[in-house]
Amino acid sequence: MGRFKPLSTAPVPERAILVGVDLGKSEWGCEESLAELARLAETDGAEVVMTLTQRLDAPVPRTFIGRGKVEELCGYVRSLSADVVIFDDELTPSQQANLEKIVGEPVKIIDRTALILDIFGVHATTHEGRLQVQLAQLQYVLPRLRGMWSHLVGEQTRGGIGSRFGQGESQLEVDRRLVRARISTLRRELERLERRRGVQSKARWDSGVYRVALVGYTNAGKSTLLNRLTGADVYVRDELFATLDPTTRALELDEGRKVTITDTVGFIQKLPTMLVESFKSTLAEVRAADLILLVVDASDPHRELEINAVRSVLAEIGASEIRCVTVLNKADLLDELQLRDAAAAHPDAQVISAREGTGVRGLLYRVAREAAAGSVTMSVLVPYEKGLLMRMVHERCQVMRETYVQEGLLATVKADARMARTLAPYEASGPAAQQQGADGEKDGLVQDVDDKGVPADE
């Protein structure tokens, strides 16, 4: 055994150089944006060996960065043995092709969009998620096919004897046709899945179950919060875009009302438009929600910028009008002064630690309060033969008091507008119903809470 040295089978991380251009037009500083790009690169398995920046009024049309900076980049690529150069902004197909020609093979030139698409390709697990990622990747690749077949284009335009006769359909044209055909197939399949999701969403709407969606910047702790609230076993890891596929779980609140909570894909600044378009069926879960919990990493120094990035995407998908509650997560990573400052900046927010469980009970009371907003209190008498309606009363209403009498279920409930219309024909009146409503209030079934939604006795 001593004669042979075992070879490691672990993948060797690619050495990456990051390039950013400060155009002075973004809320995010160049350094902050490159720091996030470094996390993205590390999530994708690369090792960042250096970052390169340049201040420009506008990108250079041919190479995005200036000629001198390109020469400097070539020197760093050779001296550091870099495998890939990652630009923080999206490159045009011609800029990417020109940079690849100047830097030389086998070094890859990619941009932030390509990096995010690669991460999505690794993390997508469901059939729909993989189709969405593949569609976005093909839409990204299609305008970049020309550079891949430039040697064939050169042969066709060389001229000389016989050059007037065409060579048939070029490989570039064949590939473009195949890619377009595949894009059309993927769109049809995703439309079919979206119709199915729409049927499921309509069934949830018709059921009257209150729907809550978790949204937030990537790695804000949404999946950890879902696991804490519902006991789900959703994949959790300290990396960007650990969760891509939406997960919906049921939760029963203390007063008996059932709600659904959906964990969604994390957002990020400079989120590629094609990704938003490809994931529109997934993001439809957000648009269909009754309440959005905007989960924020309270310990992140850039949390305000991240909140703005999330709100921007919500506006882009048409969900900006939905009732939204900010949840400041990871409070366990803040000291008392930082915690006070964060709460002061967002006085209406719920401050929690999903990992430690602190503040979660107060968050649940806040969700219950939001779910009960607009509800009406009514006494109903549901006949025994209306078994389905009895079940709906227990699942969709907050039952304050109930009694089984000879005619059926006599209950005082809090019901939303739709359920109130359903129960209107069974509304009870008379001394028994009035006495039951009074008893419910006297028993204090509606608990007093403080301004943060935390029970007074907690």
Image (spheres, rainbow, N blue to C red):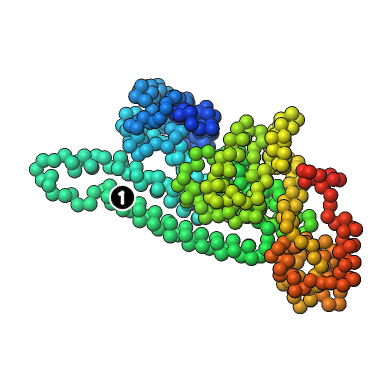
In depth, the one of 224 and 396 nearer the eye is 396
Badge 1 is on which residue?
175
Q: Report x, y in % for residue 332.
A: 72, 35
* Label 1 SS: helix
Q: Report x, y in % for residue 185.
A: 40, 58
In depth, the one of 198 and 130 nearer the eye is 198
Q: Report x, y in % for residue 363.
A: 73, 46
Rendered image quadrant of residue 147: top left
Visible in this render: residue 142?
A: yes
Rendered image quadrant of residue 160: top left
278 vs 309: above or below: below
Visible in this render: residue 353?
A: no
Q: Amino acid at mark 1?
A: Asp
Q: Residue at x 33, y 53 (%)?
A: 178
394 vs 217: above or below: below
Image quadrant containing the C terminus: top right
271 vs 32: above or below: below
Q: Residue at x 66, y 65 (%)?
A: 207
Q: Residue at x 51, y 62 (%)?
A: 195
Neighbor class of circle 1 (other Cα within 10 Å; few <14, some 14-19, many 20+) is some
Rendered image quadrant of residue 184: bottom left
Instruction: Name the side, left or right, on which 163 lies relative to 404.
Output: left
Instruction: Name the side, left or right, on which 353 lies relative to 15.
Output: right
282 vs 431: above or below: above
Q: Residue at x 13, y 49 (%)?
A: 165
- Of all residues, the one furthest to the left in this rendering is 161
Query: How many discs mark residues in the rendered view?
Result: 1
Q: Report x, y in % for residue 381.
A: 81, 72
